[in-house]
Amino acid sequence: MIIARMAPADEHEVAAIFGSYDQTSMPHEIGVRSRSLFRFHELYVHLIEFDRPGPEAMKIAQSLPDFRRISEELRPYITAYDPNWQSPRDAMAQRFYHWTAAPEGVARPQAGGRR
């Protein structure tokens, strides 16, 4: 998940850039399974699901000319959230909690809760 800043009026331009890019072979080369873009006021959230570890996928992406091209196209619309940003890794949110539902019919172990 990438966090950055974007003017709300630019969401259509950003979506069009990704829409064009996602029609190429590039997402498959990197291992992108899905992409969702979100906006909350001027906060831009880019959720990407990969079929390999994210850092590995980003390393592959950064070596590809088309990745650098899309980064340049996005530059007028997306700005770093953190003023100390130096690389894409600096914009990646860190997950601190995850839950997945058990398939129906599968008993879930009961965990002791706080009382």
Image: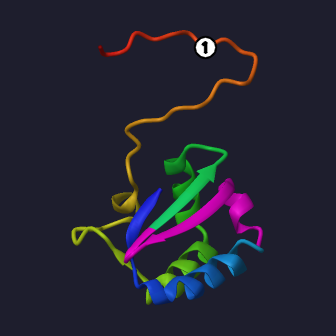
Say if 103 sits above or below 30 in the image.
Answer: above
Residue pictured at 51% horizontal, 78% vertical: 71
Q: Residue furthest front?
A: 115
Give residue 31's position: percent from left, percent from top.
68, 53
Tell which of 79 and 98 is nearer to you. Answer: 98
- Let me know if residue 31 is in the magenta part: yes
User: Which of 78 and 44 lies nearest the eye of the viewer?
Assistant: 44
Q: Is residue 32 a member of the stretch shown in magenta?
A: yes
Question: Where residue 66 appears, x then y in whole percent?
Answer: 63, 76
Q: Residue at x 22, y 72 (%)?
A: 83
Callout 1 amino acid: Arg
Q: Is residue 42 left or right of residue 45?
A: left
* Region in magenta: 24-44
Toward which corner of the image does residue 5 lie, by quadrant?
Answer: bottom left
| Quarter placement of the C terminus | top left
Residue 43 location (% of width, % of height): 38, 71
Q: Which residue is mark 1?
A: 108
